[in-house]
Image (tube, helix red, strand yellow):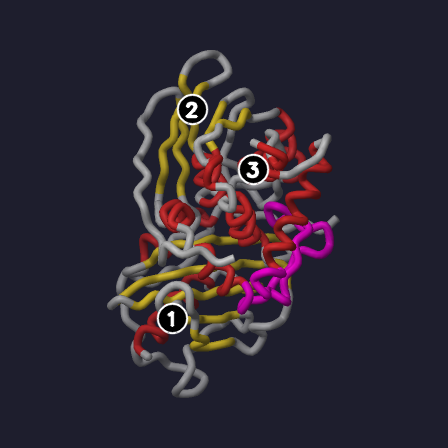
Amino acid sequence: MGSHARPNRIHRTGARIATVALFGAALPITAGGLAQAATPATHSAEVNDQQSGESIAPAGQSRSTPDTRSADVPKTKADHAFLLDARDGSQEREMWAGAKADESVSMASTTKIMTALVVLKHPEWLDRQITVKQEYRDYVSENGSSTADLQVGDKLTVKQLLHAMLLPSGADAAMALADNYGAGDTVDARIADFENQMNTEAQQLNLTGTHFDSFDGISHGDNRSTARDLAKLGQRAMLQPVFADVVKNKQYKAEAPAANGHTRYYTWENTNTLLSTYDGALGIKTGSGTEAGYAVVFAAERDNRTLVGAILATDKTRFEDAAKMLDWGFAH
């Protein structure tokens, strides 16, 4: 894979296990995205979002006249919140900012949005195969991370690993990508190089409240962002058709050559329940952890309008608050 290519590594984000079997069928990938033009220690562990007992609003339920702190803002529990109108995809307009929208806090697995963006700077490698290493599974075990349950010796494509990272929030998949897209003679050197690429990209996108010291969200002391920055990052990510196509899936099935010569079949469930509960939801990424609390970066489309938002450092009401923000935004 060129100067930035070699296989292997992982990330910590909670306890989530994907279904793996030796039978099944792969689902096709379709084109998507907001637009075709693209623009340039401490633990934070992803929990099992679909088993967290969160209260979610019914799909399509309208809150066009919300009970708000004032008549002009959505009523949310979250202060680390931000909502923008993506306009034509390449432009954005601020719609609403919570009281702490610009405070840098731990972002947990929403980190993986940037991991995906760095990978997608090399679309020519999407069909390249990466071999799963024991180090990836060890990383998950040692850190109690969320996992796509990748099996040692299996060969998955970069595109499959993006699904494994962004849907069940697989730290094993995130490490595999970072290890293969970083430069260096050791796993640690390649990971460090990849994280430098993440920070360079953040600077180029003018995400001034954002810093990465992790490829998956498990912080080493300085992995942070703001709700404003993450909403902008989410909007930029949705400009990438491959990213948008991945995060819209509620479930994804993949098959890969296994080490024993047979075929392995994987099934990955999306942790973002807004896809099932909010009419017009498009993705993007959840996150949660002991330090970070609950987070979600989200997007939805109605009446030819696309809104993108972010909520950080909140509780299990994140999906309810995201729905309130979206309803308010579409009503304005």
Q: Nearer the viewer, mark 3 or mark 2?
A: 3
The image position of residue 53, as x and y in percent, is 43, 53
Name the residue that disc number 1 marks. 324
The image position of residue 320, as x and y in percent, is 40, 65
Q: Which residues are magenta?
A: 203-229
Name the residue that disc number 2 marks. 256
Q: Give the secondary structure at mark 2.
A: strand
Q: Amino acid at mark 1?
A: Lys
Q: Give the secondary structure at mark 1.
A: helix
The one nearer the camera, 263 or 243, is: 243
- Look at 50% across and 76% down and name the residue there: 97
Quarter-wise, where is residue 38 in the image? Answer: bottom left
The image position of residue 67, as x and y in percent, is 37, 81
Q: Is residue 187 left or right of residue 96?
A: right
Name the residue that disc number 3 marks. 177
Q: How far is disc 3 from disc 2 in space, using C-alphas? A: 16 Å
Q: Give the secondary structure at mark 3.
A: helix
- Look at 38% across and 63% down and name the residue there: 89
Please report whichever mark, 3 or 1, sits nearer to the chain's N-terminal start: 3
The one nearer the camera, 109 or 48, is: 109
Q: Decide: is 257 above or below 330.
A: above
Q: Amino acid at mark 3?
A: Leu
